[in-house]
Amino acid sequence: MRMHAIITGGSSGIGLATARLLSARGATVSLLARGAARLEAAAQEIGAHSRAVDVSDEAALTTALQELEGLGGPCDVLISCAGLARPGRFLELEPAVFREMIEVDYFGTLYAIRAVAPGMVERGRGSIVAVSSAAGLLGIYGYSAYGPAKFAVRGLMESLRAELTPHGVHVGVVFPPDVDTPQLADENRFKPAETFAISGTIKPLSPEAVAASIVLGIDKRRFLICPDTGTKLLARLGGVLAPVLNWSFDRKVRSVTPGSAGARRADRR
Ligand SMILES: NC(=O)c1ccc[n+]([C@@H]2O[C@H](COP(=O)([O-])OP(=O)(O)OC[C@H]3O[C@@H](n4cnc5c(N)ncnc54)[C@H](OP(=O)(O)O)[C@@H]3O)[C@@H](O)[C@H]2O)c1
């Protein structure tokens, strides 16, 4: 029987590139996202099943996943890619943004996994991969709402690796840096100048490159799926590198906003 891969956020960017790759390898693919038009176009292009759903709605997502398993067979691979990023300065962000990031990026991932993991454990096989972010490895200026949600995804996957691997289920977590997708274009509209100063000079990866690293990570049953050298170093040596990176990023932030005398005194401590 063909492998059934289910991808949340499969109508665009990294999710769609991964769906194309898995479909080209002969997998049965199912896609989920909210916007029906873009979703249907993607599903038609690759011959996938699809359901329009908001991943932060647990009941609707669980039903959609059950229906997709009814159509394509039990889920062999779940890729939780649906996500949103809304940067902004902590003191200026609307309270609703903090909640939305957690609800979509974290709970959207948790609910999808809760729906398919029991079946995988029962069958003693399967692969669950969640997309976190470089912002889930290091606290970065401007990501006080998005970063914690992606840190939570990483924490969840670390626990699941320990719990589900003994049942034959592969667990992986992806840490993309900036990737050239509609999300990045949208995010850039809200990025403070300081966040641009930190990351603006780094050339974004293509969604196809990230998709290739996800599929390789599944093939090799890797836990850490890092599409570039920077995130690989950060994922493995984050604690060691953090003081140096923070020093460099703080300098870039100061080049945009010189800061108060109090802040400069606190920095030197
Ligand atoms: N692009 C980057 O620089 C970057 C870097 C690190 C990590 N990431 C992460 O990579 C993942 C994919 O992002 P991308 O860059 O490929 O973005 P994208 O092209 O905007 O795709 C996001 C996908 O998620 C879906 N989605 C968003 N909110 C949803 C919700 N509440 N319920 C269901 N589906 C939802 C979108 O469809 P609808 O809007 O129609 O629902 C779309 O299919 C995200 O988790 C993102 O945080 C991206």
Image (cartoon, helix red, strand yellow):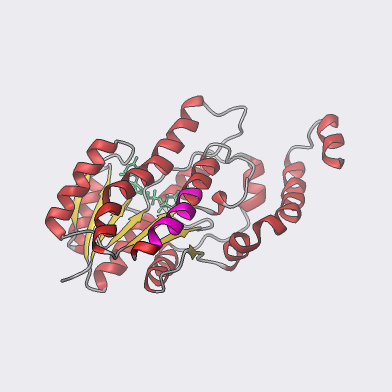
Give whichever of 111, 183 is nearer the camera: 111
35 in relation to 179, above or below: above
Residue at the location (44% across, 58% down)? 161
Q: Which residue is farthest top?
A: 95
Residue 121, magenta (yes or no): no
181 in relation to 92, above or below: below
Q: Which residue is farthest left?
A: 71
Dominant SS type (magenta): helix
Q: Is residue 159 left or right of residue 113?
A: right
What range of the chain is rendered magenta?
A: 155-165
Residue 221 place in picture, x, y as percent = 41, 70
Residue 160, magenta (yes or no): yes
Q: Is residue 210 left or right of residue 229?
A: left
Residue 188 place in picture, x, y as percent = 52, 45
Count how many numbered circles sit on residues in the image. Answer: 0
Give whichever of 192, 238 is nearer the camera: 238
From where the camera sits, is residue 11 visible?
no
Give whichever of 186, 24 is nearer the camera: 24
74 in relation to 260, above or below: below
100 in relation to 84, above or below: above
Residue at the location (45% across, 63% down)? 206
Give whichever of 190, 139 is nearer the camera: 139
Residue 228 place in picture, x, y as percent = 54, 67
Q: What quarter of the picture does the N terminus occupy? A: bottom left
Residue 71 place in picture, x, y as percent = 12, 56
From where the camera sits, is residue 32 visible?
yes
Q: What quarter of the picture does the C terminus occupy? A: top right
The part of the image, by quadrant, that contains residue 177 is bottom right
Q: Is residue 246 left or right of residue 13?
A: right
Q: Is residue 181 left or right of residue 25?
A: right
Q: Which residue is farthest front?
A: 166
